[in-house]
Image (spheres, helix red, strand yellow):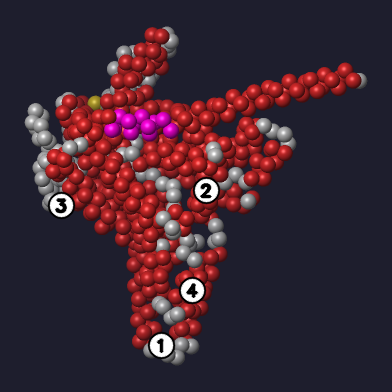
Amino acid sequence: MSDVISRAVTPTTSPREPAASHAAATAIAASAGTGGEDVPPSAIQGSAIGDRIYSTLIWAFAVCVPILLALIAIEIFVAGWPALHQFGFKFLTSSAWDPVHGQFGAAPAIYGTLVSSVIALLLATPLAIGVSVFLSEFAPPWLRQPVAFFVDLLAAIPSVVYGLWGIFVLLPVLRLGVMPFLQQTLHLKVIPLFAGPAYGPSMLGAGLILAIMVLPYIASVSREVLIAVPRAQREAALALGATKWEMIWGAVLPFAKSGIIGGIILGLGRALGETMAVTMVIGNRAQISASLFAPGYTMASLIANEFSEASGDLHLSALMAVGFVLFVITIIVNAVARWLVWSVSRGAEGSA
Amino acid sequence: MSTSALSFTARTAATLGRRRAVNYVMVGVIIALTVLATLPLIVIAFYLLKFGLGSVKWHFFTNMPKPVGESGGGMANAILGTGLLVGVASLIGLPIGIGAGLYLAEHRGTTLANAVRFLSDVLNGLPSIVMGIFAWQFLVRPLGHFSAWAGGVALGAMMIPMVARTTEEMVRLVPVSLREAALALGYARWRTSLTVVLRTASAGIVTGALVAIARIAGETAPLLFTAFGNQFWSTSLNQPIAALPLQIYTYALSPYDEWHAQAWAGALVLIALIFVISLIARFATRGQFGGGSGD
């Protein structure tokens, strides 16, 4: 548990340490350079050259990261430019994705991406918060590690394995069990959300798979911020006579709120860009349908599904443009999430 | 007077009863949610073993993929391909990632370090399919053919931010006194960093590297348009190459039951591979810095 806390707070702890080491290092280096009598001058010169090579080298490696990101942005933007240029703003709003007639609008894919991600978050968030609250407030110590391990392990399963499981286990269950149950037994067919034929490959299937896939990300962030809530916060609520649940609801969750929201947005970032599992269960059709039982597309699945058989330069460029839109959206979402989590861990440290 | 006091106690008793009831219900809800959250892993593991175990035979590891109708097909080329791709990715991702991590740890607080740290996190959240089309545009399109190189570069680029961040955290756990002791003995700064600091943090860095390898080994999306897949035995990095995740994807979408069984077997092998790497990663840090659990 202590290492979890340290992991949550490390980015901001003890800012003085490295500065001190830096100062100490320069001081020692300086004294070695001037006062050291036994050290031959050539050795000192050698170490100075070594230091320069070393610091240049790690500087070069560090600079690779911004360069790589810029390169990705430029390459994809340049490749997508012909389509963006030809269709302009309509590229985002038009729902006509028709490679045969050279019409490309990304709206169905953007819609599908948002809907499947929202389903995923609606399903995963309560589970993630539930399991995190259990781990931070109720779980006996012997149960804590295994439960956290079981949830965390979900993040280690490759996307394609989720897809495989989705095709052969989840979709049949949806087609034969859940969908008929909702439509016939509960008579929800009249609601557009659950209308239409139940094939299996669907927006609902994609949302369910995504929910399982983002669960570990939301859960691990929630767990860390909940554990970082100061003890005094809990004890104060209990001292006022609150029940355990009132303590959680009134004192713990509000304290951790923005951190949990950060975790949810981090999960959103994962869900938006998830490719293989979604491609395998969503049905891959460029349409906007109100029904969750209808097949659809997400931006990532559109690229994965059509890229290798793109029917021409414009088609390829349109797919690249979709990739660029996805790139921009995920960067914004991730930046917001990082900022939220960061501000919470800083706040927790300040008051602890 | 006494009656109002009585009704007051009665009222508080009733409220307390309700509050207690809410408490019990909500505790029940939380436990139910916890059970529900641990369920997916159990269900997925169950089906992996149920469908996959029957097809994982010895020839699965030694034979090549066979056409539909012929029994005894395997994924030897895909296993080799995944190994080669991970190797290329590590050659690119590990040095750059570790170097960048060292920079982040040693130059904390500078503008560049803050920017690199933030951009690493951004890069980490980048969808893998975006990395795939980038590698295609950057390497496959100009060269005119798919290649293992392109796939390895895409995976290596994904490793950089992961390795950089774990390296930074591990290096920062090294006590400053160690560094100062080395410097006081007359070590140059670069030798201090490489032989004292990096060596002290090595177990943690190895763990971080293995975790990153475990993550990219299962990636499919960056390989779709780069490594592309290959039905034949190929060790050339200039040619398209097979990979386990790609093979699983192709077989899962095929209409043949035999191939579906192969896909399940492939999934089981892939998961086992990732699990073994993760376990080694856990053991690598055992006894150092309190176990480095998580991830």
Q: Which residue is mark 2?
A: A1
Q: Nearer the viewer, mark 2 or mark 4?
A: 2
1 and 2 marks on the same chain: yes
Crowd around label 4: few <14 · some 14–19 · many ≥20 (10 Å): some
* Vertical placement of residue A73 versus A86, above or below: below
- The quarter holding residue A137 reads top right
How many angstroms separate mark 3 from mark 2 (CA)?
44 Å
Q: Nearer the viewer, mark 3 or mark 1?
A: 1
Q: Specify whether residue A279 is painted magenta.
A: no
Residue A337 is at least partly visible in this image:
no
Residue at the far bottom in the pictured view = A37
Image location of residue A70, percent across then percent down? 34, 52
Q: Secondary structure at mark 3?
A: loop
Question: As shown in the figure, which amino acid type bears the numbered disc 1?
Answer: Val
Residue at 73 percent across and 20 percent down: it is B14
Q: Which residue is mark 1?
A: A39
Question: As shown in the figure, which amino acid type bears the numbered disc 3?
Answer: Leu
Residue at the far right in the pictured view = B1
Q: Which residue is mark 4?
A: B180
Q: Secondary structure at mark 1?
A: loop
3 and 1 marks on the same chain: no
4 and 3 marks on the same chain: yes
3 and 2 marks on the same chain: no
Question: As shown in the figure, which amino acid type bears the numbered disc 4?
Answer: Glu
How many angstroms separate mark 3 from mark 1 (CA)?
49 Å
Q: Nearer the viewer, mark 4 or mark 3?
A: 4
Image location of residue A329, percent across then percent down? 40, 39
Q: Earlier in the sequence, mark 4 or mark 3?
A: 4
Chain name for mark 1: A
Image location of residue A34, percent across then percent down? 47, 87
Question: As shown in the figure, which amino acid type bears the numbered disc 2?
Answer: Met
Crowd around label 3: few <14 · some 14–19 · many ≥20 (10 Å): some
